[in-house]
Image (cartoon, rainbow, N blue to C red):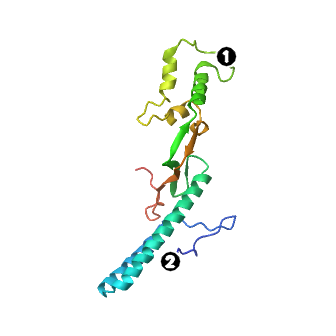
């Protein structure tokens, strides 16, 4: 179906062959163009029966591609070493779509109050408990004052805490946002900024 010329790809130390995103995209584009050429041939020949069979085959392929895409996305989400990481050609970022989040708000609030009131190294009380302005600032960065009434994960991270330690997700699925960065054109050469 979709083929990539593996003759130029070299195995790595584990014996795995890595084909660049650009080569994979080129192979997919060539396959789609050949399908479109075949479609036009069938239209010109007024072969609606074969065209209908092609339509059904394309719909089956789409379902199968979506299934494998979902499996690969879950695998990448699970294996991604950080929230954001990059290959030579792709930037990837972990995300989550759908579902609901249950926060352990009492525990999170207690942890934030401890961050506010006590020195993390000595455990000594560092701020008078009456200093409500300081308390309002630290809580204001993370309290659920958004339209969704969810805690602000950026504010939680700003305080050195990991939001996932204080929440459970129900439903939804992992999602990976990818951004393709084409390799530099070897004909152009490196740019020196001028």
Mark 2, Cα crowd under 10 Å, few <14 / some 14-19 / many 20+, is few
Asked if one can make out residue 191 in the rendered structure from this viewpoint, the answer is yes
Q: Do tag 1 and tag 2 residues touch (Cβ < 8 Å)?
A: no
Q: Is 189 drawn above or below residue 82 in the view shown?
A: below
Left/right of residue 141 with respect to residue 45 in the rendered view: right
Mark 1 vs mark 2, CA separation in Å: 67 Å
**Circle 2 — which element?**
loop
Instruction: Tell me what residue is drawn at x 48 percent, y 35 percent.
Output: 150
Of residue 8 and residue 40, the one placed in the foreground of this image is: 40
Instruction: Tell me what residue is drawn at x 54 percent, y 11 percent.
Output: 130
Of residue 59 and residue 38, the one placed in the foreground of this image is: 59
Q: Position of residue 78 (x, y in %)?
A: 61, 53
Q: Position of residue 132 (x, y in %)?
A: 50, 15
Q: Earlier in the sequence, mark 1 or mark 2?
A: 2
Of residue 83 and residue 54, the one placed in the foreground of this image is: 54
Mark 1, Cα crowd under 10 Å, few <14 / some 14-19 / many 20+, is few
**Circle 1 — which element?**
loop
Q: Is 70 drawn above or below residue 154 in the view shown?
A: below
Left/right of residue 26 with respect to residue 157 in the rendered view: left
Q: Position of residue 46 (x, y in %)?
A: 30, 86
Determine which quarter of the picture holds residue 32.
Answer: bottom left
Asked if one can make out residue 26 in the rendered structure from this viewpoint, the answer is no
Q: Is 116 drawn above or below residue 27 in the view shown?
A: above
Instruction: Tell me what residue is drawn at x 56 percent, y 67 percent.
Output: 19
Left/right of residue 122 with respect to residue 43 in the rendered view: right
Q: Which labelled disc corresponds to residue 65?
A: none
Total numbered circles: 2
Q: Which residue is mark 2?
A: 1
Of residue 61 and residue 98, the one placed in the foreground of this image is: 98
Q: Which residue is mark 1?
A: 124
């Amino acid at each position: 179906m979709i083929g990539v010329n593996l003759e130029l790809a070299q195995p790595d130390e584990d014996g795995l062959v890595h084909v660049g995103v650009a080569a994979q995209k080129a192979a997919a584009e060539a396959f789609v163009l050949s399908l479109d050429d075949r479609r036009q041939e069938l239209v010109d020949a007024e072969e609606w029966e074969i065209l209908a069979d092609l339509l059904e085959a394309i719909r089956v392929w789409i379902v199968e591609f979506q299934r494998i895409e979902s499996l690969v996305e879950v695998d990448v989400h699970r294996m991604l070493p950080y929230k954001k990481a990059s290959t030579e050609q792709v930037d990837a970022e972990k995300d989550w779509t759908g579902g609901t989040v249950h926060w352990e708000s009492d525990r999170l609030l207690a942890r934030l109050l401890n961050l506010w009131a006590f020195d993390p190294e000595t455990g000594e009380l560092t701020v008078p408990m009456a200093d409500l302005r300081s308390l309002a600032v630290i809580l204001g960065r993370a309290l659920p004052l958004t339209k969704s009434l969810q805690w602000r994960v950026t504010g939680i991270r700003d305080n050195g805490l990991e939001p996932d330690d204080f929440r459970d997700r129900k439903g939804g699925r992992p999602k990976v946002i990818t951004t393709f960065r084409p390799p530099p054109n070897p004909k152009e050469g490196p740019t020196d900024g001028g």
